[in-house]
């Protein structure tokens, strides 16, 4: 029999501002986003995950958990067959109506969409509460905040540098100022040239990038082979003239999980190298 603390009701507020209350801590969790899978493992709830979506590849143990689809198409029957007492999912784009559908079928849903560093830390605390691993969740959140403060202190006074952050080449796509990646850019002393666009993941034109004339262009490594080669024909751009066509591991930086600090540190080092070429 579970101890009383593990049988009592638990509650937490998700990133959409909804309070999620469970009659007892979650023991069967379905994660519908790779970053959510990483967050759950970070707070000691990895053994409770019974289903994940495509690209949930970290930590290695996540690759052995059955798949229930991807971010665009979920196998609702399989999810229901797993009898989860908690579903953790991404709350943007095509995923949002699928989460609402799961709620209409009687499942408890935690909407996870951290947009900044503090939201990642608070998400770890919230998920720890829901899985009765609160001590692990608090420890993970405290360690995350401590490392973040060290990075902020180290890079606080860096000279500003303008950046175009490319997440896809055809069509040409980027991220606006509300995305976590822009928080990382700001921490490293960089300005996202498309921060002001209204959509979280906007499509832009080559002409718009050329007009913005960023000092560096950064692409998510692994997006496509030789993702930056097309920019080399625009020799008048500052990024091309300076040799600042750069790549970074998008799996670290684009996911709103605890490893984003590792990605941020690599991003800051990459931008320091770009500044050195001024």
Image (cartoon, grey):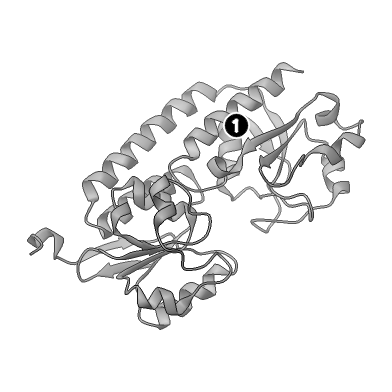
Q: Position of residue 159 (x, y in %)?
A: 66, 22
Q: Nearer the viewer, residue 189 or 27?
A: 27
Furthest residue toward bottom: 105
Residue 175 x/y as whole percent: 66, 50
Q: Nearer the viewer, residue 34 or 21?
A: 34
Residue 87, quarter of the rendered image: bottom left
Direction from residue 61 to residue 218 in the image, left or right: right
Q: Is residue 141 left or right of residue 52?
A: left
Q: Quadrant of residue 72?
A: bottom right
Image quarter where the N terminus lies is: bottom left
Name of the residue lying farthest toward the front: 64
Position of residue 247 relative to residue 205, above or below, is above
- In-image side of 183 versus 246 (left or right): left
Tally the numbered discs. 1
Whether residue 58 is visible: yes
Which quadrant is home to the C terminus? top right
Q: For the residue carrying disc 1, how many other residues have a C-alpha within 10 Å: few (<14), some (14-19), or many (20+)?
A: many
Q: Which residue is mark 1?
A: 267
Against 173, is 20 above or below? below
* Secondary structure at numbered mark 1: helix
Residue 180 higher or lower than 65, as above or below: above
Asked whether, in this view, residue 2 is left or right of residue 45, the answer is left
Residue that appears at 36% across and 52% down: 40
Q: Position of residue 275 (x, y in %)?
A: 70, 21
Q: What residue is rendered at 27% in x and 69% in y?
A: 21
Q: Relative to the observer, which residue lies in front, 56 or 144?
A: 56
Q: Position of residue 166 (x, y in %)?
A: 72, 44
Q: Residue at x 53, y 54 (%)?
A: 55
Using the rendered image of the protein, determine whether residue 188 is visible from the camera's viewpoint: no
Residue drawn at x 61%, y 22% as measured from the top left: 158
């Amino acid at each position: 029999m579970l101890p009383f603390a593990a049988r009592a009701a638990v509650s937490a507020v998700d990133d959409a501002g909804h309070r999620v209350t469970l009659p007892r801590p979650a023991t069967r969790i379905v994660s519908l986003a790779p970053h959510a899978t990483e967050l759950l493992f970070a707070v000691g709830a990895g053994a409770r995950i019974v289903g994940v979506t495509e690209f949930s590849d970290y930590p290695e143990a996540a690759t052995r958990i059955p798949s229930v689809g991807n971010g665009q198409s979920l196998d609702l029957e399989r999810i229901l067959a797993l009898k989860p007492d908690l579903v953790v999912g991404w709350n943007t784009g095509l995923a949002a109506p699928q989460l609402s559908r799961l709620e209409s079928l009687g499942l408890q849903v935690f909407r996870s969409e951290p947009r900044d560093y503090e939201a990642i830390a608070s998400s770890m605390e919230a998920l720890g509460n829901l899985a009765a691993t609160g001590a692990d969740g608090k420890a993970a959140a405290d360690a995350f905040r401590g490392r973040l403060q060290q990075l902020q202190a180290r890079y606080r006074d860096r000279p500003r540098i303008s950046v175009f952050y490319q997440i896809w080449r055809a069509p040409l796509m980027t991220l606006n100022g509300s995305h976590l990646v822009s928080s990382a850019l700001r921490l490293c002393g960089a300005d996202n040239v498309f921060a002001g666009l209204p959509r979280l993941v906007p499509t832009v034109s080559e002409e718009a990038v050329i007009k913005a004339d960023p000092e560096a262009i950064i692409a998510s490594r692994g997006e496509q082979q030789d993702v930056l080669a097309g920019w080399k024909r625009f020799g008048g751009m500052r990024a091309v003239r300076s040799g600042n066509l750069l790549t970074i591991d998008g799996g670290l930086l684009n996911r709103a999980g605890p490893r984003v600090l590792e990605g941020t540190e690599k991003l800051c080092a990459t931008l320091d190298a770009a500044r050195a070429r001024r």
